[in-house]
Image: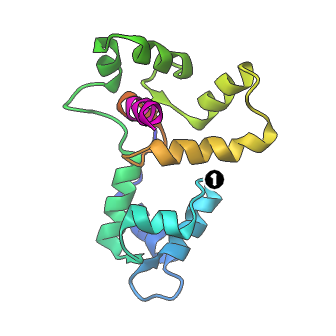
Amino acid sequence: MSSALNKKDLQRIFEKLDKNGDGFVSLEELNRLLDRISVEFSLHELESLVGKPCLNLDEFLSFYDSISNHHNVNGGNKKNIIEEEDGDLAKAFKVFDLNGDGFISCEELESVLGRLGLWDENSGKDCRRMICFYDTNFDGFVDFQEFKNMMLHNVSS
């Protein structure tokens, strides 16, 4: 995310999500927020990601951090990791990473699939689900390691 929210902003969001004022954000409340920003999960998928039926403020802040921090791996840029990788996987990843930032977004995936004739209006939801399914650090993007895991998983299946 280009403009990170501070703790006070996040606390206000948490309080607005906590409709019943019990000090917890339920998965239903969290899911309504995610739906509004076009991140679609079933409640079962969300519970498996979060690991519990509700979050207190500290857990909510940690969840936000986990989905918003897609910068800095070992103090460096993820793009450097891709440049160090050899082989066809790195080349394939770069085909999808249209802006060269080291991440595949839903929009980039849709664009490439569209050029290949494999995307239509109904596939947009599937692109978001595919990104979410393979996005193990919950930042909303597929980085090279996640792409590599996806490709190796699909080859071995």
**Horizontal and vertical percent for residue 25?**
45, 77
* Residue 7 visible, this orientation: no
Q: Quadrant of residue 105?
A: top right
Q: Nearer the viewer, residue 49 or 38?
A: 49
Magenta-colored segment: predominant secondary structure? helix
Q: Please name the residue that numbered disc 1 is placed on.
A: 38
**Extreme left residue here?**
74
In this rendering, is residue 26 above or below 46?
A: below
**Looking at this view, is 21 or 88 the one in front?**
88
Disc 1: CA contacts within 10 A as few (<14), some (14-19) or many (>=20): few
Point 65% across, 23% down: residue: 112
Disc 1 residue type? Ser
**Front one among 21 and 111:** 111
Which range of residues does the magenta coloring cover?
Answer: 146-157
Instruction: Decide if residue 131 is on the left or right side of residue 25.
Output: right
Q: Residue 47: x, y in percent?
A: 44, 69
Up-down relation of residue 32 to residue 117 (above or below): below
Visible in this render: residue 62? Answer: yes
Whether 50 is among the magenta residues is no
Toward the viewer: 7 or 32? 32
In the displayed structure, does residue 28 sit left or right of residue 49? right
